[in-house]
Amino acid sequence: MSATVPRRVSWPTSARAIVGNPIVLWGAFILAHFWLGMLNLYAPGYPLGDVSFVYKFWTDQAIVAHFWVGIDSSWVYPIVALVPMLMARVFGPELYSSTWLSLVMLLDAVALAFLTGWGRGRQNIAVGWWWVGFLVLLGPISLGRIDSITVPIAIVGVLLIASRPRAATVILTVATWIKVWPAAIIVAMVITLRDRGRIILTGLIFSLAIIAVALALGSGLNVFSFVTEQTGRGLQAEAPISNIWLWQAFAKVPNTVVYYDRALLTWQVRGVGVESASNLMTPLMLLVSLAIAVFAVLAMRNGATVANLLPSLSLAFVTAFIAFNKVGSPQYMTWLAVPVILGLVANVAGHGRPFRTPAIIVLVLAGLTQAFYPYLYGYLLGLNVVMLTVLSARNLLLFVLLGWTIFSLWQAGRERAENIPLADESTWLPAAWPFTTATTPDPELDSDLAKN
């Protein structure tokens, strides 16, 4: 009687089965957030400093002194940013930092549930792994700023664009009133979707409702102060344009220094030409964004589909917002995850342009950002040549990413996809709503699991 020989399973097939298991993904998601949470709380460089000190101070002012930023004074953030900052006090001011991290993890979990179909299938598992990898590569800053609140909200919004564009608009509008950057995706929707009139009206109604509440609370023009607060500031040290003066300071060019702005609580550069450059950055950003919009409109006239155009256009706008921004904070890298996830999900569904290249570039950008922030940020401010090189490489790669998005828009105008009729804007992205029963299977993954 011959012995039974166990069936040998190849490692790649076994690996795909393990990685394709939603339970494994959720386990990695939880471990990643605990790891990042520990870094925020205990790693050198005070990665959670803005939350623990600045955000908490603002809420202390509101609760204890009855002085509300954005209402009783001008504020650097839109007024709805106060909501998550106040929510972090739900278990008391002593637990503010840990409650903040828990809140971000909860929002990220909701976004991952939307992304992976609420357990109804295995669609977008690979995209979920990409996002977890992105968070880990970016490091503690991926959880430790107000941007961390807007990213999962925006992910939910973009996943609903095809099936529920007005709901997506509401969600993205709320995110915009926490931190302005999601407005870039709304603009991309207005340009590419046929239902642009309703999108504009929906965004306007909800914005007016938020403004009305702020005015009723006595904000006056302070409700718009987040716009004016940004226009008058200088060049932050990490901004791409600031590389010019960082290297000049390294070369000891007279009157070129890195200094701490106590009013804005940030490090900036000072030198010949800084003020002129600071005044030019916002107009330049708007000009570049207008040029990108023109590219997109031309592509639409040439027959580009929504699936081909919207992810690349959203990424182009968001990248331009970072590349030509005079602030350039490390947490801005979190914004890039949202349009990349949109492009990857559309591609997994069999539509849209390949998004592997920008996905890889954004992962590298995340890793380069953690390479200098927060642990070694002091060396950067001290003009260490290695840290200056890392920052310069990251900032240069931002323009490479921007170049890819513009090339993609140009290509979309030349190659109209045949698998989606131009008039159909609802089939290119799987429904992400939790009460939808339809699923989007992954035939290749199902085949691999069956073989195993």
Image (cartoon, grey):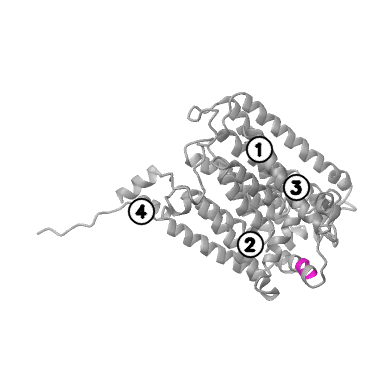
According to the picture, the residue beneath numbered tag 2 turns out to be 140
Q: Which mark is residue 412?
A: none
Q: Residues within 10 Å of mark 2 (few under 14, many from 20)?
A: many
Residue 413 seen in this snapshot = yes
Amino acid found under the numbered disc labelled 3: Leu
Q: What element carries label 1?
A: helix
According to the picture, the residue beneath numbered tag 3 turns out to be 208
Q: Give the mark nearest the N terminus, 4 or 2.
A: 4
As displayed, is residue 104 above or below residue 440? below
Front: mark 1 or 2: 1
- State the separation of the CA atoms marked 1 and 2: 38 Å
Q: What element carries label 4?
A: helix
- State the separation of the CA atoms marked 1 and 3: 15 Å
According to the picture, the residue beneath numbered tag 4 turns out to be 14
Q: What stretch is highlighted in magenta?
A: 57-61
- Disc 4, disc 2: CB below 8 Å? no
As displayed, is residue 247 above or below residue 53? above
447 vs 269, left or right, is left
Q: How crowded is mark 1: few (under 14 residues within 10 Å), some or many (20 or more)?
A: some
- State the separation of the CA atoms marked 4 and 2: 32 Å
304 vs 278, left or right, is left
Amino acid found under the numbered disc labelled 2: Pro
Q: Which residue is drawn at 77% across and 35% down?
A: 287
Front: mark 4 or 3: 3
Confirm whether the magenta stretch covers residue 426: no
218 vs 46, left or right, is right
- State the separation of the CA atoms marked 4 and 1: 47 Å
- State the separation of the CA atoms marked 4 and 3: 53 Å
Q: Main secondary structure of the magenta part?
A: helix
Amino acid found under the numbered disc labelled 1: Arg
